[in-house]
Each structure stands twice: as C-alpha cells, then as structure tokens.
Image (cartoon, grey):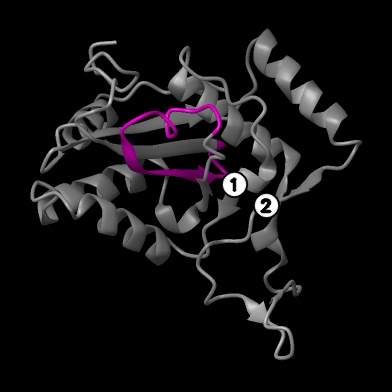
Amino acid sequence: MKLLESGRLEHLSSVLSNLEMGEWRVLGSVESYSCKVAGTEQKGLYKKMAKDGGGSDIVALSPPLEANFLSRSVESDQEVITPENLEMFVISRKMLFNLITTLNLSFFPDYDFSDAKSHEFSRSPSLAHVWAEIDSRLGQSNFYNRSVRQKLWEEIDTEIGGLKNSEIFSYKPDFESDPFSESGCVWSFNFFFYNPKLKRVVFLTCRAISPNSSTSEDSEFSMED
C-alpha cells in the first residue's frame, strides 16, 4: 500500500486540525491509500497474518456498536447471526491487512499496529451511522459549520469514487499502545472508506486533545512533516 498524495485532502486535514472545542484541540487527518501491496515489510506482514490465521481467509469482526440493525433472539435477547447480516461480523484477511497497513502508514514512525486484532475493527451498518458519530464529535466545535461538513464529505466522496460504492469500517483500539491511549486524549474516531473497484482506502481519523496532553504541534498530523 502507499499514500496517494492529494493537496485537497491535505488542506482538509489542516482544516480539521484547526477546529477548537473550548480548551480541547482537534488533531485530524484525511488520507487516501492505494491497496496494492508494496515493500518487503508489507509483504512480510501479509505472510505473517496468513500464517497466524491457519489458512482461513475469513476472520471475525467486533459487532457494530449500533445494535438496531441486529437480529436478536426473543428468548435470550442476544445477537443472532443470520445470512442477511453475516457480512457485518466477518472480514477477509486481505481486507484486515489493508486496514492495519493503513494505520501503520498513517502513524509511522510513532506507532506500530501490526499486532492489532480483528476484534478491534467493526463494519459500519450505514453511512448515516457514520455521519451521526462524526457530527456528534466535531459538532462540539463552533467551527464545524455546514460549509466545513459539506466540504468534508464532498472531498471524501470524490476521492473514494462515491461513498455509495464504499464499504465502511471503524477501528476501536484496545488502548494499550496507540495514539488514542495517550494522556489527554478525550475522544477519537477512525473510519476507513474502501472502494473495492478502485482498490482504495480513504482514512478519516480525529482525536480531541486536552491541555494537559504532551502532544505537540509537530505530531504525526502536522502538515509541516
């Protein structure tokens, strides 16, 4: 995989990273990646994941946090996997590799997500759920107005070749060793928009940092890097 340079997305990342929420500061990034495996390290990671999987091409995802789409047992009120919603609970090992590699490239060299597990990822049931979560977070800033919101989704839609053609995944870390567990991180979200025809991933990530955070302006999201 490799980063696809885009002046439009770089500008959008700068806009997100200039959002203010009282004393909190937002670090945001929108990046586009080609899904073609490239380089010795990426090939090595893919082979390792295939070996660890014992030959299985499918791995389990964490259930979506949004529970209203799930079929539930009347007696136990527990999640029930049906043919209709099966794809919400599984992912191909190749796609999992794409998501992990995207994280590695985005946060290189500060963090390594190679050991991330499939249960830390989930599939979003709809674009509406994604919009709702992002609006609930970024909407806390007065600077996240209608114009900024419209620009955000127009650029992502263009870059990914149509949001309606995309599969959407989210990453919910285990908070052991990643940028979202650092001191001062108030909240975060991480969404991957994948177009299988273009073999492209657009990665949207944001986190709110409180004043007591040690994160500085030369973080991995800095546009000067």
Q: Which residues are magenta?
A: 176-199
Tell me, yes or no, whether the two marked residues, 2 and 1, touch with CB atoms within 8 Å. yes
Horizontal placement of 80 versus 225: left or right? right
Of all residues shown, which one is farthest toward the bottom?
74
Residue 75, magenta (yes or no): no
Residue at the spot of label 1: 121
**Which quadrant of the view contains residue 9?**
top left
Of all residues shown, which one is farthest toward the right?
54
Of the image marks 2 and 1, the number of the one nearer the N terminus: 2
What is the x, y in percent for residue 59? 77, 47
Query: Residue visible at 87% across and 27% down?
Result: 51
Label 2 element class: loop
Query: Residue visible at 80% across and 22% down?
Result: 47
Q: Nearer the viewer, residue 42 or 186?
A: 186
The amino acid marked with disc number 1 is Phe
Vertical placement of 90 versus 85: above or below?
above
Q: Nearer the viewer, residue 86 or 112?
A: 112
Label 1 element class: strand
What is the x, y in percent for residue 200? 51, 36
